[in-house]
Image (cartoon, helix red, strand yellow):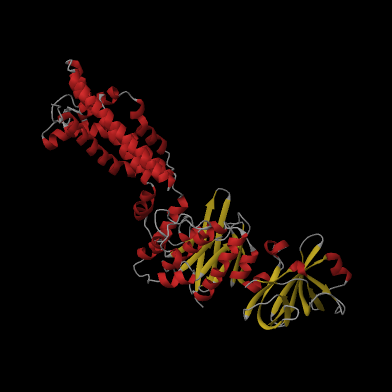
């Protein structure tokens, strides 16, 4: 598989960026980290907006790297169409994808308009269309949804899903929002204080329990599952995956789905609770444990080829004498469908 | 019959000066707006000096520098055989320096209010820095350019002291309208002074009025 090499170091005041890693040249790579971890700085180095040692010396405008900013950065003196054509015109070998792109992002109806009076979501879709039309070899997205409110964000997310499914250009997607990362990425790079602390396939990295960056609210695994059936009587959908099946409230059309199970939504029990209100109880094997804080412990569980992460108290771990290799039951309180 | 010569000469001078100032002033304004160099405040101060200095001070040193024995004037004489002082070309050079801040500052203000990210977006979309300057920075700064043009033009039209020092009073060459008015008053020809003065007042009002109207249109857009 071909890869994109990311090798950048830079020193800015007391902040040091030192990254040397490779990411797959297909799909979406999530770049996750707290604010101040250097995510944006790394993106700016890749784009050439920041001078780093180790990076290519090509000037910004010759790199053919698309950049989607937090704010759409549309040019106010140009119409929507002219905005989208801006990059296409400047890359002589860029094919005319205007029509295809405006269809994908549903901006056809906006083409004739001026950029004044667009909603935040529309403007951001146009800025993404503009980047696609320049036919870049790599697209960088710097928290493209963070400037939008919840409603607008949910309006734009499906377009990013479509982009992911239908476009073959590799994307690096920066976010400090683990839910967006879970939904969109295939690959994950975790950044902390300018350094890569974890990197790999999304499911693998998310099932790691030794990373403080993936602790707390961010702890939890994802499962890629296929829809098995819908129970109309109780309005529940059954999803199957390697190692088990899981009920999710509501009706879900998609044949495949990515399920996110937060670590705090799983509890463990030695025996199968027969009279429990919990719908999903899965037999799992304890693979590893790691102390998260004075009172809590993260436990990695395996089922089939998948992993789950659970948070339990340290007291429960001792009390139940849970050991690596033990077969236990995971009681899952809540599951969210991420895509 | 009104003597249109000085008025026409003033308009020519103001036009040429404005064109030169926009062409040379825009890159200077851009540099001033973007530079983080230690030289920036120095250049900024030099550009602003004509606002503070009496025109006679400026005119005095321009007379020396542009004169046949001066650094620029001497070179010009060797090059063309003509003197710069008391010539139209000399007036243009003097006017450009005198009106420089009035052209540079509005453009600089406009450039400074551009968002850096907007320019970065243009670069990442494949525009070179020069391309982005012309295709993004300049069109987004139209108002600054309009102000610069109007102010540079009007200010050149109204100059007196510098012209008197550098240009003198040669009809058709350096006898601009302000000099002509002064001359008419000196010779007690108040009727002629009135004609030129009232024309200038009217012109100044119409110019500034149109500028404010245009600005208001833009604001409401």
Residue A208 visible in this rendered orientation of the protein: no
Q: Quadrant of residue B43?
A: top left
Label total for image: 0
Above or below, B108 relative to A95: above
In the picture, residue A250 is in which quadrant? bottom right
Q: Give the left or right position of residue B215, taking residue B94 as reference.
A: right
Q: Nearer the viewer, residue B215 or A291?
A: B215
Residue A154 screen position, x and y as percent: 60, 65
Q: Is residue B192 above or below residue A292?
A: above
* Residue located 12% across and 33% down the image: B82
Check the picture and name the quadrant holding the C terminus of chain A: bottom right
Relative image position of residue B194 (x, y in whole percent): 22, 22
State left or right for residue B135 relative to residue A286.
left
Q: Position of residue A26 (x, y in %)?
A: 51, 74
Front in this rendered view, residue B106 or A221? B106
Residue A9 visible to an observer of this rendering = yes
Q: Write the residue at 28% across / 26% down.
A: B58
Q: Of all residues shown, which one is farthest toward the right?
A: A319
Vertical position of residue A191 compared to residue B141: above or below:
below
């Amino acid at each position: 598989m071909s890869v994109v090499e990311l090798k950048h170091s830079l020193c800015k005041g007391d902040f040091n960026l030192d990254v040397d890693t490779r990411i797959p040249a297909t799909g979406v790579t999530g770049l996750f980290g707290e604010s101040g971890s250097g995510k944006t700085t790394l993106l700016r180095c890749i784009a050439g907006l920041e001078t780093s040692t180790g990076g290519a010396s090509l000037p910004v405008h010759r790199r053919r790297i698309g950049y989607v900013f937090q704010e759409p950065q549309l040019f106010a003196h140009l119409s929507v169409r002219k905005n989208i054509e801006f990059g296409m015109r400047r890359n002589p070998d860029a094919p005319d994808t205007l029509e295809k792109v405006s269809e994908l992002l549903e901006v056809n109806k906006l083409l004739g308009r001026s950029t004044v009076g667009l909603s935040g979501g529309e403007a951001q879709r146009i800025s993404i269309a503009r980047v696609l039309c320049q036919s870049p070899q790599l697209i960088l997205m710097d928290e493209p949804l963070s400037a939008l409110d919840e409603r607008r964000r949910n309006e734009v997310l499906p377009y990013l899903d479509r982009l992911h499914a239908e476009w073959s250009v590799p994307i690096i997607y920066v976010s400090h929002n683990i839910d967006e990362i879970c939904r969109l990425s295939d690959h994950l790079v975790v950044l902390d204080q300018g350094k890569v602390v974890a990197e790999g396939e999304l499911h693998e990295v998310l099932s790691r329990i030794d990373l403080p960056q993936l602790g707390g609210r961010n702890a939890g695994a994802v499962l890629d599952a296929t829809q098995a059936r819908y129970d109309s009587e109780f309005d529940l959908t059954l999803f199957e995956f390697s190692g088990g099946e899981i009920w999710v409230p509501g009706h879900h059309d998609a044949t495949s789905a990515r399920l996110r199970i937060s670590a705090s939504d799983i509890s463990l029990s030695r025996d199968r609770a027969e009279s429990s209100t919990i719908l999903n109880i899965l037999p799992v094997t304890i693979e590893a444990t790691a102390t998260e804080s004075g009172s809590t412990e993260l436990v990695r569980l395996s089922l089939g080829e998948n992993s789950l992460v659970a948070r339990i108290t340290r007291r429960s771990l001792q009390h139940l004498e849970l050991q690596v290799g033990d077969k236990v039951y995971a009681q899952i309180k809540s599951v969210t469908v991420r895509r | 019959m009104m003597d249109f010569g000085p008025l026409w000469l003033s308009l020519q001078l103001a036009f040429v000066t404005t064109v030169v100032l926009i062409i040379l002033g825009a890159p200077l304004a851009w540099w001033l707006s973007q530079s983080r160099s230690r030289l920036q405040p120095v250049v900024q101060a030099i550009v602003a000096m004509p606002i503070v200095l009496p025109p006679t001070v400026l005119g005095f040193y321009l007379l020396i520098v542009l004169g046949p024995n001066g650094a620029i004037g001497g070179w010009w004489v060797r090059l063309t055989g003509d003197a710069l002082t008391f010539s139209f070309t000399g007036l243009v050079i003097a006017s450009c320096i005198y009106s420089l801040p009035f052209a540079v500052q509005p453009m600089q203000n406009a450039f400074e209010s551009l968002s850096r990210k907007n320019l970065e977006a243009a670069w990442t979309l494949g525009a070179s820095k020069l391309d982005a300057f012309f295709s993004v920075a300049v069109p987004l700064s139209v108002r600054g350019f309009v102000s610069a043009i109007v102010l540079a033009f009007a200010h050149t039209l109204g100059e007196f002291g510098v012209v008197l020092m550098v240009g003198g009073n040669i009809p058709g060459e350096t006898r601009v309208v302000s000099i002509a008015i002064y001359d008419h008053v000196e010779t007690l020809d108040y009727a002629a002074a009135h004609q030129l003065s009232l024309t200038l007042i009217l012109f100044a009002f119409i110019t500034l009025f149109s500028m404010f109207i245009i600005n208001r249109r833009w604001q409401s857009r």
